[in-house]
Every structure is written in structure tokens, then in C-alpha cells.
Amino acid sequence: MAAHRFHRPLLFLLPLLVLAALSAPSDAKLTLNYYNASCPQIHDIISNVVTTKQINNPTTAAGLLRVFFHDCFVSGCDASVLISTNAFNKAERDADINLSLPGDAFDAIIRAKTALELQCPGIVSCSDILAVATRDLVSMLGGPFYSVRLGRKDSLTSTATIVAQNLDRPNASLDRIIAHFASKGFTVRELVALSGAHTVGFSHCNEYADRIFNFNNGGPLAFDPTISPNYAQALQKACANFIKDPTIATFNDIMTPGKFDNMYYKNLLRGMGLLASDQKLATDPRTAPFVKLYAANQSAFFTDFAHAMQKLGVYGVKTGKKGEVRRRCDAFNTLSA
Ligand code: HEM
Ligand SMILES: *[C@@H]1O[C@H](CO)[C@@H](O)[C@H](O)[C@H]1NC(C)=O
Ligand SMILES: *[C@@H]1O[C@H](CO)[C@@H](O)[C@H](O)[C@H]1NC(C)=O
Ligand SMILES: *[C@@H]1O[C@H](CO)[C@@H](O)[C@H](O)[C@H]1NC(C)=O
Ligand SMILES: CC(=O)N[C@H]1CO[C@H](CO)[C@@H](O)[C@@H]1O
């Protein structure tokens, strides 16, 4: 608004603004030792808090990994997903797709933030906590450990209405999912590697019910023929009551549900992918070679997953004046948004 009113008088500032824009890339760089001087204990504090949380609530890690993905894919890794809805604004986390963004994951971040505020008040951003805590918990489940560059600022907005267009549903076509990842700069190989996150955690029956009940209008117990029959029947049993009780969920990887390993890919090869979008990765010629590679070689999966997570973790990050270090992760510092 102000820019409109003072349009002409401000024109002389243009060269300065151009200079500022040119120098922006250097301060947009995240660094490994960003908090080295200002909060040297950051890694110990986050790791202690989330490890304790995971021991007490073993669903935390998978929940947090999903929250991190949702945060990054919707307007960048800026902790916008942590904001609570208030009277003025319906926030990202209350978009329909959140169904089940798990409370324990949010709680882990709030606890880490509280501990950090005691040691280094006002220093560590919620988006950096999210990135480090996710890495710590992936490795606690047996997954790869990778370095996380720091210096993200937290968003100044969080908007429920932009969520659906940024996250695909399991019934989306693979063309769409590939194109969507590509539009954010992620390759097919990275898509397949990141999907390996579904080696942990749960999905609710309604996310795959159309695959196990009345598939193609073939009768109540008709199931998608790409699912192995035994698995389909087990899922039908588990989900028999899901309409009355929408909280019923099953493991994404029923073989080793709490372990971060390459079992997800092995499952896909034997018709034990849970979501339609998962199972398609095993048959489409663009993605199948990577599924086979990761199923055969867990280190290849870990290497690619770690790189893809580092890339996901810098997607759309805000630095400098484009964001703030929130005092509380669930609210902006000023109450106007
Ligand atoms: C490619 C497109 C993707 C689709 C369509 C998709 C869809 C879903 C759905 C429907 C669920 C079940 C949610 C529920 O019922 O509570 C889920 C769970 C999960 N997703 Fe994805 N996902 C995708 C990619 C990813 C990526 C890239 C990651 C992380 C890098 C991820 C991590 C997870 C995790 C860890 C869970 C388990 C959450 C829990 O146990 O609380 N997903 N996903
Ligand atoms: C951290 O900072 C101290 C002094 O500020 C410096 O001596 C040390 O080399 C730094 N460590 C890293 C990893 O940058
Ligand atoms: C996918 O499922 C959602 C409901 O979960 C529905 O609104 C949408 O139309 C479906 N999309 C396709 C492509 O079938
Ligand atoms: C598995 O992948 C790793 C990492 O890419 C590679 O170094 C190794 O040679 C592969 N192992 C086999 C048996 O192909
Ligand atoms: C539609 C829906 O299920 N929204 C939920 C999103 O998550 C919050 C908790 O973070 C729930 O209160 C909403 O009901």
C-alpha cells in the first residue's frame, strides 16, 4: 500500500534496491555452523528432546517426517505448517488434507523450541528445528544420517487454501505427480527416493479404501488386482469398519513398520504397496528401475534419500528479512496475519 502512495519519491531508491537484490544470493545461503556462536548446543538440545519424545510416543518420527514434507512442499520449508488457525486466518495445518497431521510431531517441535528458548532465547528458527529434528528421527529409526544446513527464517504467512494445489492425493496419476515434483525441481529419481519415507508410519483406510472395496464396481470385496490377494484380504479385515470409525489406520510397511529401511521397495515388487500412488511406482517404466535399484541395494536408497532430503530441506527457504525467528512455533510474532 505505502509503495503506491509514495511511488514517485521512492524512485531514486531503485539503484539501491537493485544492488540489494544482486547481493541477496549470498545471504540466502544456509550454513552448517549458522548457530555455532549463538547457540552452540542446538544439536544436543534438539536430539535429546526428540529422542525422549520418540521413546515415549513411537509414532512421532513418521509423523514428523510427513509434517516436514508438507511444510516444504507448501510455500517452502518455513514452518508455515506449524501455525495454528486463529480468528483472522485459517492456517495450513487446518486444510482438509491434514486429516491426521499427527499431534505428537507438532508436540516434539514445541518441546524442542521450549528447551532452546531457555538456552538461547530468540535465536533458533522453528523451520531449522523442523529440519534437524526430522533428520535426527529418521536416523533414530535406522535411516541415513545427513548434514543439515541452517539459517532458515520462519514464514510470515500460513494459508489453508494453498495446500491442496501443492500436495497430491494418492489417487493422482503418476503423470501428475511426476510433473508436480518436476515443477518444484525434483527429478523422477528423487521422487522415488523420497517416497521411500513410506517405509514408516501409517495411512488411514479412507486413503486406500477404493483399492480394496468395490474396486471398479466389481462388488463389495473386489480389490485392485495389483495388490497381492493375501494383503488385500488382510486390509479388508482391518478396514471393515472404517466408515463408522475413520481413525482406523494400517502400517505403510507391514513387514518392518517402525524401521527406516528399503522394505518399502521390496513390498512394492510383491504387490504390497498400500497407496495407489506407491504401487504405481513399481510398474511405470519411468520409476520402476529406481524401485528395483532401491529394493536390491539399501545403501543406494540411503544415499539418494539423504541427498533428496537435503534438497527438500532447502526448497523455498526464506532468509534475511523475508521471515522471522518465531518466539513460539505455532504463532507469528505479531498478531496481524
Ligand atoms: C508422492 C506423493 C505422496 C503422496 C500422494 C503421499 C500420501 C500420503 C498419505 C495419503 C499418507 C497417509 C496419511 C494418513 O492417512 O494419515 C501418507 C503418510 C505418510 N507420508 Fe506420504 N505421500 C507422498 C509423499 C511423501 C513424501 C515425499 C514423504 C517424505 C519425504 C512422505 C512421508 C510420509 C510419512 C512418513 C507418512 C506416515 C505418517 C504417519 O505415520 O503419521 N510422503 N502419505
Ligand atoms: C565455531 O566458532 C568458533 C569461534 O567462534 C571457531 O573457533 C570454530 O572453528 C567454529 N566451528 C565451526 C565448526 O565452524
Ligand atoms: C481423488 O480423491 C478425492 C477425494 O479423496 C476426490 O475428491 C478426487 O476427485 C479424486 N481424484 C481423482 C483424480 O480421482
Ligand atoms: C549399492 O549402492 C552403493 C551406493 O550407491 C554402491 O556403492 C554399491 O556398489 C552398490 N552395491 C551393489 C552390490 O551394487
Ligand atoms: C479437516 C481436519 O481434519 N482438520 C484438522 C487439522 O488438524 C487440526 C489439528 O492440528 C484439527 O483440529 C483439525 O480438525
Image (cartoon, grey):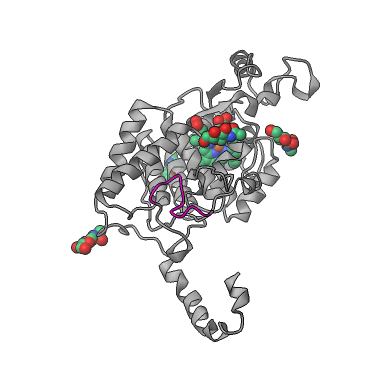
Q: Is residue 269 magenta?
A: no
Quadrant including the N terminus: bottom right
What residue is drawn where x is 29% and y is 43%?
A: 115
Left or right placement of residue 146 versus residue 16 in this view: left
Q: Position of residue 260 (x, y in %)?
A: 43, 33
Q: Position of residue 55 (x, y in %)?
A: 33, 28
Left or right placement of residue 83 versus residue 150 in this view: right
Furthest toward the right, the residue is 217
Q: Is residue 271 above or below residue 165?
A: above
What residue is drawn where x is 35% and y is 41%?
A: 136
Tell me how many marks there are: 0
Determine which quarter of the picture holds residue 130. top left
Left or right placement of residue 46 versus residue 90 in this view: left
Determine which quarter of the picture holds residue 290. top right
Q: Is residue 311 above or below residue 251?
A: below
What residue is drawn where x is 38% and y is 33%?
A: 141
Q: Is residue 331 magenta?
A: yes
State ligand 2's quadrant. Answer: bottom left
Instruction: State the predominant SS element of the stretch in magenta.
Output: loop
Which of the pair 42/266 is nearer the observer? 42
Q: Is residue 258 above or below residue 143?
A: above
Which of the pair 316/300 is nearer the observer? 316
Q: Which residues are magenta?
A: 327-336
Residue 196 seen from this side: no
Q: Position of residue 205 (x, y in %)?
A: 61, 23
Residue 326 seen from this side: yes
Furthest toward the bottom, the residue is 12
Which of the pair 299/16 is nearer the observer? 16
Q: Is residue 158 above or below residue 230?
A: below
